[in-house]
Image (cartoon, grey):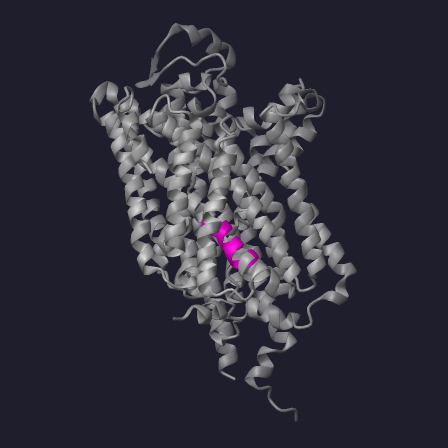
Amino acid sequence: MIAPLAPLALIGGVDPWIFIFSFVTVAITIWMGFRSAKTSKTAGDFFVAGRSVSVGWNASAISGEYLSAASFMGIAGMVMAIGYDALWYPVCYACGYLFLLLFIAGPLRRFGAYTIPDFAEGRYDSPVFRKIAVVFVMFIGLFYTLPQMKGAGTTLAYIFPGLPYWVGVAVVGAVITLNVALGGMKGITLVQAMQYWMKMFAISVPVFVLMAVFGGYGKNLSVNDNPASLAAALNPVGIEQRAEVVRQPLPANAPKDDVWIAPFGPLTTKAAKAAGLSPEETKPLSLVYTYSLIIALVCGTAGLPHILVRFYTNPDGVAAKRTTMWVMILIGVFYVFPPVMGVIGRNLLPELYAATGAKGTDKIVLELPRMISERYGVWGSILSGIACAGAFAAFMSTFSGLLVSMTGALAHDVYGRMLRPQSTPEQRMRMFKFAAIGIGGLSVLLGSQVEQLQINFMVGQAFAIAAASYFPLLFMSVWWRGMTMKGAAIGMLSGGIAALACTTVINLSDLKKINLGSFWIENPLIRILCEQPAIWTVPLAIILMIVISKLTSKDIPKDIRMKMLVLHAPEALGLKNEYIQEQQAGAGH
Amino acid sequence: MPPTPTRDETVHSEAFLSSLMRRQLRLSIGCAAAFFIALLGLPLANYFAPAFMATRVGGFTLTWLILGVLFFPYVWLISGYFIKRSLKLEADEAREVLSK
């Protein structure tokens, strides 16, 4: 897949080190995919890795899948662009896991259904509900795919200056699609575990080197304390040197120090500022924005379909819990680093504020290590190469995980259960490959349209949809036995569709496809509730679930006590209803 | 004198299920409360005490230090505690039933 690009390396502007590191990353990923394709034979291997992945591997693989382009590139870019408020993203990405552990992971694991559609059908005895759940797997998956594609396009445009954004998206999309079609889930587990460690290396090493050369995290933050008036006066003076920290002058469109470093900065006040509200009127609105963002990210993590499916690759519930603990440590350690890049980037590379699209702050993680070159020559290129390798690992692993879960839903649910229930395991495996190619193509097509949107912002939207649909479904189904299928379906659909509609409107208006500028200026609160809908869509979904379930309480499944028992009784009692047995029995050859 | 319930009757009794769910939910909610106090409290602290939260600590503002660094170890503590307690809870529940 890279071969057609090789001649581009001969064209001027390509740094050979950066190219080599990225190429090696891609080559290893493809090689591991091919290698594991030989060992994954049964349908169980493809869908849940034969359920026999060890805690260490599985924790690394979940973390590898979770740390997407948004984590690797987007957080640093967003911290640089908007400052303090962006810190909520890494914190809530990590904290959402805790929420998942506390309320959802254990019961779902005990229940033994291995996709959300399986759970939806098993809990409510309703094939109709399974279909609804499948549709949502697709929607959330596609929304979460877009930022990965933006990451891919940005990175390739950085490695090959002059390469159009969409070519990068197409190349990376094709490579990963091929990999998934050949390797399935088993390949993905190994590849992703390795990719976690690659990302960790690729973010921590450049950060440590940058801090050693340009001063520590705190030191770089300490220079961001100019009051607004002073900063304007200092701006044209040129390079500012204080406390041994180098600082380049900020361009005019960069946020000033005092708003950048303080809470309720440019992100949360944008709508109110556009409406020309006074600071006193702005503050409550930005508090609403902050809470809505927190709810979306925390609940959204707990509802991400491609993360949930991995809990089933643990051999038992104890292992699943220990895995979650390790995931939390692995991603928590990782998330300390990207904001450091953003902070140092603000001081050293403020010219990125001036650019947009693939040339803007989203590429700070790739570009910043090059600053080392000024003092240590080729090491800057090598570090930048390592960072690019990490970026590849980031969007490749998350995209393949998403592709597996969307493809699994198509092959296993739509084809295997709805269209052709009589199909053989071989036919389903072939369908898995076709579905992978189809969805991969669709992702590339959509991904090439989003160059102007910020990576992290798009991920936030995917989380907002998951938070309003899957999270209420899982949470309520696990802990409240009065839920009925109608209540669950209507709640999930209303919450999810409301969030989807809001984010679609915001995206279309930000991409200038529809013109709502003056409407947003007149109604800043509506803009905030559209941009961050979780604060009202999550309660809406839960309230609808309760009300409709009460109204239809005669439809509560007859064996509800048994279902709740399976969800909550210790696995040692052997009550589990094995949904996977049928699959394995069918594939045992 | 009523017969002692068999193991199966115990497992499938209403009392067993509700005690199971109540104990699990109590543990989860307790841990979640510790987590929400910090997560939802920090924006409030930023809102009502902005000057204090902007105090410089080693170059960081206090609120940046909390959100960007200290939050992660705090979450590990909660989850470590929860895992330890919930594994013990499960073992106890299983022992209670299997000893019948």
- The span picked out in magenta is A404-414
Residue A7 falls inside the magenta stretch: no
Q: Quadrant of the N terminus of chain A?
A: top left
Any part of residue A329 in sight? no
Instruction: Single out the residue that lies furthest toward the left.
Output: A377
Q: Nearer the viewer, residue A21 or A40?
A: A40
Dividing the picture into quadrants, the one containing residue A363 is top left
Q: Residue A179: percent from the left, percent from the top?
A: 37, 47
Nearer to us in this view, B94 or A539? A539
Q: Quadrant of the C terminus of chain A?
A: bottom left
Residue A554 rendering spot, x and y as whole percentages: 76, 67
Q: Is residue A550 visible?
A: yes
Q: Is residue B58 left or right of residue A25?
A: right
Task: Identify which residue, A107 or A284, lies in the foreground.
Answer: A107
Q: From this viewpoint, which residue is outermost toward the bottom?
A: B1
Please state if B14 lies on the left or on the right of A148 as rendered: right
- In this rendering, the answer to whether A197 lies above or below A2 is below
Counting from the top left corner in percent of width and height, residue A229 is at: 51, 10
Q: Is residue A550 above or below residue A578?
A: above
Residue at image location 43% in from the left, 66% down from the top: A316
Residue A48 occupies quadrant? bottom left
Q: Nearer the viewer, residue A424 or A570?
A: A424
| Relative image position of residue A12 (x, y in whole percent) | 28, 19
Dominant SS in magenta = helix
Does A449 appear above or below A434? above
Residue A290 as seen in the image, left or right of residue A153: right
